[in-house]
Image (cartoon, rainbow, N blue to C red):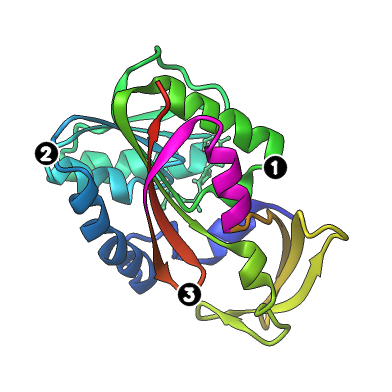
């Protein structure tokens, strides 16, 4: 049971040429452009293979990407070499960022919430607020897993090969174990369940919300500025 299986099975986060990855870039690009008017230094938190880092570099930003997965970063590095990109990709932990206070104008955090339990996410938000400059912006995209949970059924097809064969939320619905099955194999992944309300309560400790909108039924794009 691991996220590595999940990321290997689906191109959504690991294949920049896949339709799913391209669709995510297309959906989020106009939102980033709208809320990142002035150029500056960007941290792409949990950057994965770096699609959003490259996008922002192409738009004129100075970008650092950080991720805890060597596998993701290896792919990002290879793509960077091919493109002649100057994005700096670092191996590191969002819960303990290796940057000085007030280092960045923007932090983007795309689709990463389900990796973190409440204590960890609290730590991540603290770190984001710390490394942002006063007046900087935190751009957060996430799926409301709490509302999505109601719609996850045993027969839902995900990607080209897999379907969800079991959904097991814990008693308090803080996490959910999902079994992905194909004709040939299957694997389990445990996701942390975050609802919009919980995210907004936690962000309130460190940020002021500037903007919130739905990208799709369960997906949100929000903009925050640190309280400092
Ligand atoms: N933001 C990228 C995107 O939208 O394509 C990647 C999203 S992927 C769903 C979540 C990423 O968060 C993975 O690459 C994973 O390795 C990374 N991640 C998980 N825990 C992390 C941590 N503690 N610190 C930094 N990155 C982490």
Q: Give left or right: position of 32 versus 194.
A: left
Pointer 3 and pointer 2: residues touching (CB < 8 Å)? no
Residue 123 place in picture, x, y as percent = 60, 28
Residue at point 63%, 69% (across, down): 147
Vertically, is 112 above or below 226? below
- Magenta part of the chain: 196-211
Q: Earlier in the sequence, mark 1 or mark 2?
A: 2
Q: Is residue 38 left or right of residue 28?
A: left
Sequence-wise, which precedes: disc 3 or disc 2?
2
Asked if the stretch drawn in magenta spans residue 126, the answer is: no
- Confirm if mark 3 falls within 8 A of ligand 1: no
The residue drawn where x is 62% and y is 33% is 122
Residue 176 falls left or right of residue 9 = right
- The reply to whether the residue tagged 1 has its Cβ within 8 angstroms of ligand 1 is no
Q: Which residue is under mark 1?
A: 117
The CA span between labels 3 and 2 is 31 Å
The residue wearing badge 2 is 60
Q: Is residue 94 visible?
A: no
| Residue 199 visible | yes
- Circle 3 is placed at which residue position? 217
Mark 1 Cα within 10 Å, few/some/many (few <14, many 20+)? some
Numbered disc in front, either 1 or 2: 1
Residue at the spot 63% in from the left edge and 50% down from the top edge: 198
Nearer to us in this view, 80 or 25: 25
In this rendering, which labeled residue sits more in front, label 3 or label 2? 3
């Amino acid at each position: 049971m691991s996220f590595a299986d999940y990321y290997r099975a689906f191109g959504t986060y690991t294949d920049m040429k896949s339709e799913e990855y391209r669709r995510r870039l297309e959906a989020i690009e106009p939102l980033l452009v709208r809320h990142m008017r002035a150029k500056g230094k960007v941290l792409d938190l949990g950057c994965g293979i770096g699609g959003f880092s490259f996008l922002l570099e192409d738009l004129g930003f100075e970008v650092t990407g950080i991720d805890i997965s060597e596998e993701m970063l290896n792919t990002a590095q290879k793509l960077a070499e091919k493109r002649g990109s100057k994005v700096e990709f670092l191996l590191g932990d969002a819960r303990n960022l290796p940057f000085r206070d007030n280092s960045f104008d923007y932090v983007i955090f795309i689709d990463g919430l389900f990796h973190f339990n409440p204590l960890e996410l609290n730590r991540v938000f603290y770190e984001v607020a710390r490394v942002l400059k006063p007046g900087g912006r935190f751009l957060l995209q996430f799926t409301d897993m709490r509302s999505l949970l109601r719609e996850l059924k045993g027969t839902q097809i995900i990607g080209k090969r897999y379907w969800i064969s079991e959904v097991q939320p814990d008693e308090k619905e803080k996490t959910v174990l999902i079994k992905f099955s194909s004709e040939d194999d299957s694997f389990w992944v445990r996701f942390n369940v975050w609802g919009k309300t919980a995210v907004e309560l936690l962000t309130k400790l460190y940020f002021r919300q500037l903007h919130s909108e739905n990208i799709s039924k369960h997906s949100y794009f929000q903009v925050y500025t640190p309280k400092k």
